[in-house]
């Protein structure tokens, strides 16, 4: 739960004077991270040897150097390209499949067992199979990202399509609209907010799955860089790459949230 989820009352953001709310929101969002960073800095060299847990200040300096020098960008571009293709494919397939399962019984009967069996499997467990099918490289990583992101999109699309206001559907039928046009002109637009929620849930999964896949099935990308630095004992560089990909994922999620708010208002 975040401050946005709290209802008005004692201890919520609503009791703070309006001119101070931006500061309070900033503190609520970033104070836990600052506390963790402070504990990390203290633990390095005291509780844990600095060779194993480098100081956070050193790691941040290295991360900044990697960005300024452009050293990380070739690997970051490869990783983001894989995420874009895998996530994009999961959105295209997931929306069609979820809405189709909700509105057409035959489609649900056909795919239900497959998706039920696929749901509990850790998608990183499929990396060896992806390598066997597609080899080491981009295609295997894209497949893992696709599988990791597919189910959140399918489930949210399915739930949204099942709960569409039936008055809209009946009104369209009374106007002589056939079932296929109702599906794409009434049902799909009504499900957009929930579909966007599914995509929002899928974005972190995409980054998690990609880095895991690149540990094994790639010789490029941020996951490969994390593994490479870790194997040769360059732990400051390893943690720096972790921070860079974490910051990238955070920016991707927040950027999508801003886009979602605008789209939901428009719809």
Image (cartoon, helix red, strand yellow):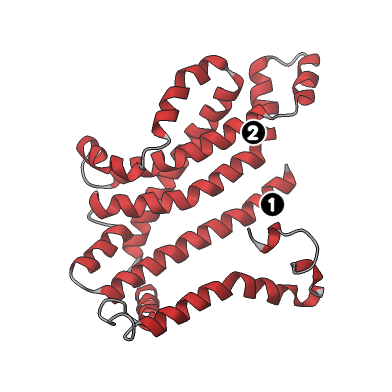
Q: Nearer the viewer, residue 86 or 46?
A: 46
Question: Label 2's element?
Answer: helix
In the rendered image of this protein, does residue 173 appear above or below residue 195? above
Residue 76 percent coordinates (x, y): 36, 61
Q: Report if the CB atoms under discs 1 and 2 are less than 8 Å apart.
A: no
Left or right of residue 137, residue 121 in this image = right
Mark 2 surroundings within 10 Å by alpha-carbon count, few (fewer than 14), some (14 through 19), many (20 or more) = many
Residue at (58, 34) in percent of width and height = 157
**Quarter where residue 234 is shown:** bottom left
Mark 1 or 2, closer to the camera: 2
In the rendered image of this protein, does residue 8 appear above or below residue 54? above
| Quadrant occupied by the C terminus | top right
| Quadrant occupied by the N terminus | bottom right
In the rendered image of this protein, does residue 142 appear above or below residue 162? below
Residue 227 percent coordinates (x, y): 25, 62
Mark 1 surroundings within 10 Å by alpha-carbon count, few (fewer than 14), some (14 through 19), many (20 or more) = few
* Residue 200 in sight from this viewpoint: yes
Task: Specify the farthest residue to the left.
Answer: 232
Left or right of residue 29, residue 57 in this image = left
Residue at (33, 86) in percent of width and height = 46
**Quarter where residue 102 is shown:** top right
Q: CA gap, disc 1 to disc 2?
A: 19 Å
What residue is pinned by disc 1?
A: 262
Q: Which mark is residue 160?
A: 2
């Amino acid at each position: 739960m975040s401050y946005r989820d709290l209802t008005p009352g004692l201890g919520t953001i609503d009791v703070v004077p309006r001119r101070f709310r931006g500061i309070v929101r900033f503190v609520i969002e970033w104070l836990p991270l600052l506390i963790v960073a402070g504990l990390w800095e203290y633990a390095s060299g005291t509780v844990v040897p600095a060779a194993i847990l480098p100081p956070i200040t050193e790691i941040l300096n290295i991360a900044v150097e990697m960005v300024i020098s452009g050293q990380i960008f070739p690997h970051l571009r490869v990783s983001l390209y894989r995420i874009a293709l895998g996530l994009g494919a999961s959105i295209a397939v997931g929306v069609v499949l979820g809405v189709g399962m909700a509105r057409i019984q035959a489609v649900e009967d056909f795919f239900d067992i497959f998706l039920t069996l696929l749901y509990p499997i850790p998608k990183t467990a499929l990396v060896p199979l992806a390598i066997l099918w597609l080899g080491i490289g981009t295609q295997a990583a894209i497949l893992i990202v696709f599988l990791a992101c597919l189910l959140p999109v399918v489930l949210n699309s399915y739930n949204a399509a099942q709960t569409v206001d039936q008055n809209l559907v009946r009104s369209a039928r009374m106007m002589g609209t056939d079932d296929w046009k109702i599906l794409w002109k009434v049902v799909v637009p009504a499900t957009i907010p929930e579909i966007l929620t599914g995509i929002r849930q899928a974005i972190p999964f995409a980054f998690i799955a990609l880095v895991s896949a690149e540990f094994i099935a790639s010789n490029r990308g941020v996951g490969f860089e994390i593994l490479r630095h870790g194997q040769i004992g360059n732990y400051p560089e390893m943690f720096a790459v972790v921070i860079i990909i974490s910051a990238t994922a955070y920016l991707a999620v927040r950027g999508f949230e801003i886009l979602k708010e605008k789209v939901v208002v428009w719809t």
